Amino acid sequence: MRIISSLEVSAVEQFNNMSLVGSWIFVLTIGCILKNSPLGYISIPLMKSAGRTTLDNLQRERRSTVELQNYDNLQYTGEISVGTPPQPFTVLFDSGSSILWIPAAACVGGCEMHSMFDAQSSSTYNHSSKTVSIQYISGGVQGVAAYDNVQFGGMTVSNQYFLLANTTSRMFENLFADGVLGLSPGYKECHADCSILKSMKEQNLIESEVFSFNVCKEKSVAELYIGDHELGEEKSKTTLPLMNNTNSWLFELSKVTVGDGIVCSRSCEAIVDTGTSLILGPSEEVKKLHELIGCKVTYYNENSIPGIHPSCRTRGKLQNVTFDTGEHSFVLTPDMYLSDCTADHCFIGILEHLNNFGSLGYSTWIFGDLIISEYVTTFDAANRSVTFTDC
Ligand SMILES: *[C@@H]1O[C@H](CO)[C@@H](O)[C@H](O)[C@H]1NC(C)=O
Ligand SMILES: *[C@@H]1O[C@H](CO)[C@@H](O)[C@H](O)[C@H]1NC(C)=O
Ligand SMILES: *[C@@H]1O[C@H](CO)[C@@H](O)[C@H](O)[C@H]1NC(C)=O
Ligand SMILES: *[C@@H]1O[C@H](CO)[C@@H](O)[C@H](O)[C@H]1NC(C)=O
Ligand SMILES: *[C@@H]1O[C@H](CO)[C@@H](O)[C@H](O)[C@H]1NC(C)=O
């Protein structure tokens, strides 16, 4: 099973003429102490990518399982421009990674179909001698570290660090965007100046390193707010502290349950990733979750998406899945975790991840759009917290 996930696994930067042994690994530090006057926030309209790829379509078009990568692949994209004069790009606004990248003019791999950046025609472009390689769960990107002006939401971030990619994985062919704008304070190794939020704060464009995804599913507009933004004071909200020793949007879960059955009760944690479509969890625990759900889980075909027979749904035999933080329970009812039902199959939007993201640990759940679209989610880098406000 392969679902696009832009959760960043690592980002390594090195000088061109150095061997891997001598490569530089930077750890991003967050929390600027600059005191700025209140500057409000900026608002960026987001596009939700085109509708779901249904099983029906897949069968009709005789697509391979590889193309199932596109399944239910909601991506939140928006417009930015880079350089002087500005060159426009569509980017995925991604809380699961920390670096902005766009394709270079000579980019090969999955970037041919996308807009590419012509560095030579930008008067503010600054080249560096460092190469950067980012590994996401679903693929990788390589290129050179560069600096240029980045514009979005009516603001210009000067001399912003970004990766000018000359090679990307084929997976990026499926991206509804040209590149990715990472909004994580730096999950792992990240050059100290890669955070665009940090640049914006330092350049007095925003008051604090906060952003909110307002992608509530019942609303027709999706928006990203960057900078402090007052969100419905009367609404119910839960603020969860980030785990210690992490620079990603990772918080602790007290337990994960299905009905009365326990799936995870210690060292459970979740990361909020706006670039992941569904909910991904550790293999063993997702298997257990499927066993407890109240219906036999089958696979559409090998390496494919798990599902159940729709009769279980109509007979009301299905259990809720609950992610509990102690303070707040994220309850997923069958209506929320099932989708694309046909006469004999409903997909379950809770899937195994590939267990290959190192220090994140074994019991990391990835909260993708399935949860994000139920709340306004505020990411606060200075306060090291994630707040979920009712839609
Ligand atoms: C390019 O980088 C150099 C060295 O860091 C800096 O002095 C210069 O101002 C930068 N140029 C632009 C256009 O930002
Ligand atoms: C991409 O850039 C790196 C660093 O400049 C270089 O080593 C590599 O050959 C380039 N790859 C392509 C496909 O141009
Ligand atoms: C900061 O996070 C804590 C939880 O760690 C929360 O109680 C508090 O309200 C947050 N402060 C702000 C200003 O959001
Ligand atoms: C982080 O460490 C502090 C001090 O040891 C502790 O009180 C706090 O509960 C920890 N926070 C989390 C989210 O684990
Ligand atoms: C599942 O959760 C919903 C919403 O919280 C609740 O109304 C329903 O009773 C729950 N179902 C079961 C079987 O616990």
Image (spheres, rainbow, N blue to C red):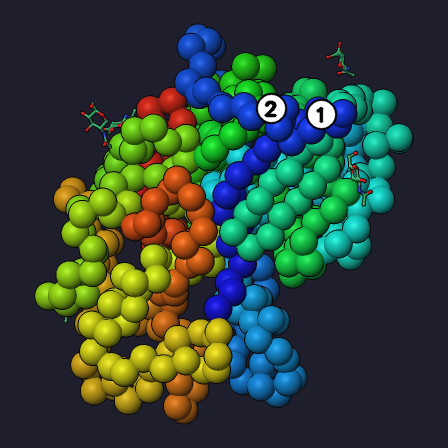
> Residue 234: image x %, image y %?
24, 39
The residue labelled by disc 1 is 18
> In the drawing, does residue 105 fall left or right of residue 16?
right
Task: Determine whether the beta carbon of the residue marked 1 sits less than 8 angstroms from the nearest atom of ligand 2.
Answer: no
State whether residue 232 is above or below residue 382: below
Give the quadrant of ligand 4: top left
* Dot in front, 2 or 1: 1
Name the residue at the left extreme. 260
Q: Of the residues shown, which amino acid type is indicated by label 2?
A: Trp
The residue labelled by disc 2 is 24
Which residue: 68% across, 20% down? Answer: 158
State whether residue 347 is above or below residue 388: below
> In the drawing, does residue 79 fall left or right of residue 221?
right
Q: Say which label, 2 or 1, has the lower sequence index.
A: 1
Please tell me how crowded label 2 is: few (under 14), some (14-19), or many (20+) other residues with Cα within 10 Å: some
Quarter of the view holding residue 87:
top right
> Is residue 138 shown to the viewer in this render?
yes
> Residue 384: image x %, image y %?
34, 27
